[in-house]
Amino acid sequence: MDFTTDRPRVLIVDDEPANLKVMREVLGNQYRMSFAKSGDAALALLEKELPKLILLDIMMPDMNGFEVCQIVKRNPKTSHIPIIFVTALGDESDEYKGFELGAVDYITKPISPAIVRARVNTHLSLVQAEQLKQAHLDLVERLGRAAEYKDTDTGEHIVRMSQYSKVLALALGMDEQRAELLRQAAPMHDVGKIGIPDAILLKPGKLTSEEFDHMKEHATIGAQILANSSSPLLQLAHTLAIEHHEKWDGSGYPNGIKGEEISVEGRIVAIADVFDALTSKRPYKEAWSVEKTVLHMQEQAGTHFDPALIELLVKNLDDIIAIKNANQES
């Protein structure tokens, strides 16, 4: 079986045939190679097949490497491809310009084969790591959507409430990285609904006391699904699953914790989840107006919700409404 087609493709762009030959000798045993002797030829190749990495000379006639880089980075189809400049230009200002245009590395000629191999391998590893991260995030969101589709919600609910959560987190003073992690984890908060029988989950009328006790088990089921992961994302998702029905005064479930015993992320998601549920139409109820919803949630501040976070909800209502309008259910 031929596994060579599984090897990453690298595009080499240089107007000197001797340089292309050297790169073939240095990298040809590890990667599939494409070659272009000009900027125009490189752009034409990119229309046919996208490489995983581009090694780009700067000093070329007609179109120099900086110009090629600008075009590649402006195109949404190619902007993700890492570019390493390989050039005889050793001036610091040239190197700075390369990075400013979006290059990930800068190698000066004459090249060291070992250095070229190491840097190409490093950047391709980073590409693979980013792809795995995106696949991981995609899987998390799809699992969250699976729970929503089992319920009467559409997948737009988790999109909206996760974005509401990030707005509140940033307003509270969380840094971008932590707030983004919350946005990514929030879709998993109701994953435990997968374990609730449809007869209860989809019942149009009011649940009996016994049925409601069964429904409440979704928080524990979700936490069990997400438990014992080494991933920070899934660790946070586990926290949200077990805490999003806890209340500020301790009257929530499943553990009856209160106040700051509930993580700030859990308190944020509780508000985002309820706000979206109340303002959305469901088979068993009409959508509440934003005004009615906010008034109700203000009345629940200090009992159901963290009062400080309700204040932030009100202060950032324009951003929340913009998200809601941009993600309406079809």
Image (spheres, rainbow, N blue to C red):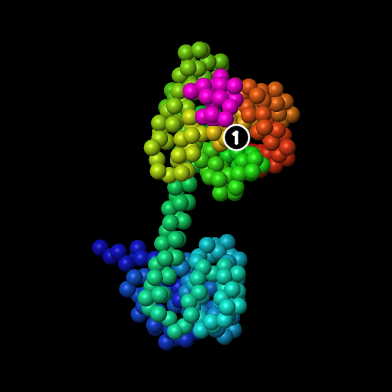
Pointer 1: what residue?
268
The amino acid type, in three-letter code, at marker 1 is Ile
- The part of the image, by quadrant, that contains residue 317 is top right
Residue 250 in the magenta stretch? The answer is yes
Question: Which secondary structure is most common in the magenta stretch?
Answer: loop
Residue 176 in the magenta stretch? The answer is no
- The part of the image, by quadrant, that contains residue 167 is top right
Is the residue 57 above or below the residue 308 in the image?
Answer: below
Q: Position of residue 3 (x, y in %)?
A: 30, 64
Is the residue 317 above or below the residue 136 in the image?
Answer: above
Q: Secondary structure at mark 1?
A: helix
Q: Nearer the viewer, residue 50 or 109?
A: 109
Q: Nearer the viewer, residue 58 or 157?
A: 58
Q: Nearer the viewer, residue 91 or 316?
A: 91
Magenta highlight range: 243-262
Q: Position of residue 45 (x, y in %)?
A: 49, 72
Q: Residue at x 57, y 30 (%)?
A: 260
Q: Residue at x 65, y 24 (%)?
A: 302
In the displayed structure, does residue 227 sit left or right of residue 61?
left
Q: Residue at x 41, y 75 (%)?
A: 116
